[in-house]
Image (cartoon, helix red, strand yellow):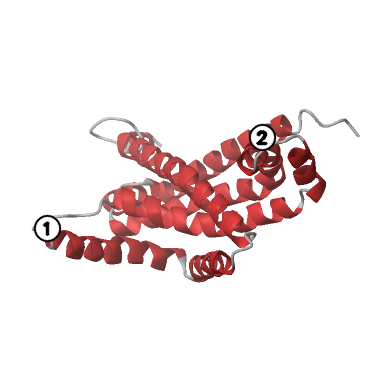
Amino acid sequence: MNDILVMLSFGPDGWGDQIAAGVYITVTLALASLPLGLATGLVLALAKKSAEPSLRAWADVYTTIFRGLPELLTLFLVYYGGQILIQEVLSVFGVTNFEVSAFFAGMIALSLVFSSYASEAFLSAFRGISQGQYEGAHALGLSKLQTLRLVILPQLIRLSLPALGNLWLILLKETSLVSIIGLNDIIRYSNMAARTTKEPFLFFSIACAIYLVLALISSVGISRLEKWTKRGEAPR
């Protein structure tokens, strides 16, 4: 028991500092990917319901690609393929040394996948808003942008929040993939600790517990957010 406490302790003799740093990287990566994925997903949903055929086709191709590719393959394409592409472009200007950080590549890859699914959540929410909402806003003299911001967007958030909450939990778990490209997250540090101490069950169990705690905290936060968005509804 004492040996386990020493291995999990903070300081030079334990792995507590590294695992805590891994938790910080995991949470930071998920939080950094979320706003980009949400914004892109909303733009895709607007493109899918647009009257312009080319916008609808572009959005459909985007979502088909990133919903069809394995997340790990998307990560590799962004990290390695994106790095090669940027280096080729920069070489024209005489820049030869450039490297895409694993954190940035992970953020972009996770955002691409998240946005492709979020667009469907937003699109379903759009379908749940009656045409009368648009007509009422037009009768009040609101512009299309004002209608979207003041009338449609608050309802859109409320209707899409359950699906987006599930996508957030998936995003949180998918951050574990970045350990493959060298980012020091929970999984990478747990793997390093397991190989060094020869205690894989202990450290991977700790990683499982951490992810479960993060999921529990997220679920509580999402539930409270859902209640907040429904605060104006009449009780049934």
Report the amino acid beneath label 1.
Phe
Q: At numbered mark 1, what does the secondary structure look like: helix, strand or loop? A: loop
Q: Which residue is mark 2?
A: 150
Q: Position of residue 62 (x, y in %)?
A: 50, 66
Seen from the viewer's position, the closer of residues 93 and 35 is 93
Dot placed on the residue nearer the N-terminal end, 2 or 1: 1
Residue in the picture at 67% in, 40% down: 147
Question: Which image quarter: residue 230?
Answer: top right
Position of residue 163 relative to residue 25, above or below, is below
Left or right of residue 141: residue 13: left
Left or right: 232, with 210 as reference point: right
| Residue tagged 1 | 93
The one of 161 and 56 positioned closer to us in this rendering: 56
Give the x, y percent position of residue 91.
13, 62
Q: Callout 1 environment at 10 Å: few (<14), some (14 to 19), or many (20+)? A: few
Q: CA distance from mark 2 to mark 1?
A: 45 Å
Looking at the rendered structure, the secondary structure element under dot 2 is: helix
Nearest the camera: 225 or 190? 225
User: Callout 2: few (<14), some (14-19), or many (20+) C-alpha neighbours within 10 Å?
Assistant: few
In this image, 152 relative to 44: left or right?
A: right
Q: Is residue 119 visible?
A: yes
Q: Is residue 139 above or below residue 38?
A: above
Amino acid type assigned to the residue bearing label 2 in the image:
Leu
Residue visible at 46% across and 57% down in the picture:
112
Q: Is residue 198 visible?
A: no
Which is more toward the observer, 22 or 67?
67
Q: Position of residue 56 (x, y in %)?
A: 58, 66
The residue sitting at 74% across, 55% down in the picture is 127
* Image disc number at residue 2: none
For the N terminus, the image quarter is top left
Q: Residue at x 51, y 43 (%)?
A: 209
Report the quarter where the C terminus lies.
Answer: top right
